Amino acid sequence: MGINAERADGTVIAKADGRIDSSNSREFHSELEAVVADSDAALVLDFEDVAYISSAGMRVILLTAKSLQKSGTKFALCSMDDSIREVFKISGFDKIIEIHHSQAEALSAVSA
Amino acid sequence: MTTTESRQKHKILVVDDEPDLEPLMLQRMRRYIRTGVYEFVFARNGVEALEALDMDESIDMVLSDINMPKMDGLTLLERIPDVAPDIRAVIISAYGDMKNIRIAMNRGAFDFVTKPVDFDDLKFTIDRTLQHIREWREALSARDKLVVLQNELNVASMMQQSILPNKFARNDDYKLFGTMQPARNVGGDFFDVVGLSDGKVGLAIADVSGKGVPAALFMMSSRTLLKGAAMRADGPGEALSEVNDVLNEDNDACMFVTMIYAVYDPETGELTYADGGHDPPLVVHADGSTTQLPVTEGLALGVLPGFDYHQHSHRLEPGDTVVLYTDGVTEAINSEEEQLGLHRLREAFEQNPPQDAEDAGHRVIDLVNEFAGDVPQFDDTTCLVLRREA
């Protein structure tokens, strides 16, 4: 698991990779916190290279969503494969967190 | 006060029958003694050395000659572990006495120096030995902490097992069976069976986010809340809404639990269920064909207060088996890093329809174990089964 992030016009695009589970969810959380500042307008988290996310990883997504909501930073996820998309659907997380097919769609949604 | 005073002083036991070594050592090492880096204590032979080690636990290392009366250095090496197992010894030998040096090393000496003693080399050897002892002690303390942590996890694991029902209703109308195979590092799965009024029965299966002690504690409160809500609430949707609202109070840690709560009415064969972000029930028919019941589009509990959980009803036919499971089943991983997936579970039942509730439950666990082989699983594997008999 690792996160690569870049920032353009106040939007952070973070790309995670590998498996996100209870063995690295803390690291995932601290890396995710480190890439985004309160002054950022939006965070787009790209799942293209994520192979698996466990409930411990889902919890980090939830924590991030809640803290970004407090700081008024928009948050969107994108580019999930079908099995990960299914996890977000079954858990109902897709009702409270925006999920887009592609990074481009996510970017245009958060900049709207 | 010098800075060296704050450093830990190391106590070194020097063992030699020649009286000249003591004043020489004190003289050559005086700088380090004065600044509190070393403290030396002396013994004249192996017997005195063992007594000193036995009396004084603060001795860090032994520096010993080989040839001495009463007990020589090689015998001392053999005896040190009995009185001070975590101590290291350095041997002083005659120059070129490879035979004794080899014996000393084989008996666990950490290093050796030769006579006449080169005190710069001795200082270096002592520091290297003390460094090793420090690292060794740190490793021991880390191991002790790990043992404590492991004990805590065992408590969490016992908690988890102790709350699961292990006796199941067996009557002419329906049979129940539930089982959980815990992951190595304690997950947070549980299932429960609640007797309700009018002969109805409540069935719950749940999976708490994360692992270890926090997951076990959250599991305990979820399970207690559900039991209470199940008795009071009018239907599964209302029960989940109530549990969710309470779990959302003071949940800064954002823990959550996915859950299915179902109520079975043996009079009508009707199964009414609500999902809280959990895989929907799988119905296995008597001929082995399977139907996955629709999701009620609930959200994992503990995420959003005030969420309105819906429910859905499905009439079971006699011979139908309802399998509730956690994602430890469908997300089990094999050596090819493939997930087991719902399709393999359905195929297994289609090829070989379950004989009864217990058979179906065991078959789910067996399927996971066969699929996973030697690959360690990181999630609990849990299922709860209801079979309508008549």
Image: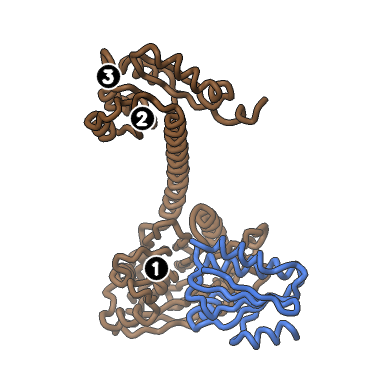
Chain colours: A blue, B brown
The amino acid sitting under disc 3 is Asn
User: What residue appears at the point 29 percent right and 68 percent down from the top-left corner?
Assistant: B373
Residue at mark 1: chain: B
Q: CA distance from mark 3 to mark 2?
A: 14 Å
Image quarter hosting the C terminus of chain B: bottom left
Image quarter for residue B308?
A: bottom right
Mark number, residue B383: 1
Badge 1 and badge 3 both on one subunit? yes
Query: Where in the figure is residue B45, as x and y percent of width and height?
Result: 32, 15
Task: Give the mark nearest the N terminus, 3 or 2.
Answer: 3
Q: Nearer the viewer, residue A2 or B285?
A: A2
Mark number, residue B113: 2
Q: Kindly state the secondary structure of the residue where label 1 is placed.
A: strand
Residue B139 in the figure: left or right of residue B298: left
Residue sitting farthest toward the top: B19
Compared with B82, A39 (above or below) is: below
The amino acid sitting under disc 2 is Val
Residue at mark 3: chain: B
Residue B234 in the figure: left or right of residue A82: right
Viewer can see residue A4: yes
The amino acid sitting under disc 1 is Cys
Badge 1 and badge 2 both on one subunit? yes
Query: Where in the figure is residue B91, as x and y percent of width and height?
Result: 33, 27
User: What residue appears at the point 26 percent right and 25 percent down from the top-left corner?
Assistant: B74
Q: CA distance from mark 1 to mark 2?
A: 66 Å
Task: Give the mark nearest the N terminus, 1 or 3.
Answer: 3
Mark 1 or 2: in front is 2
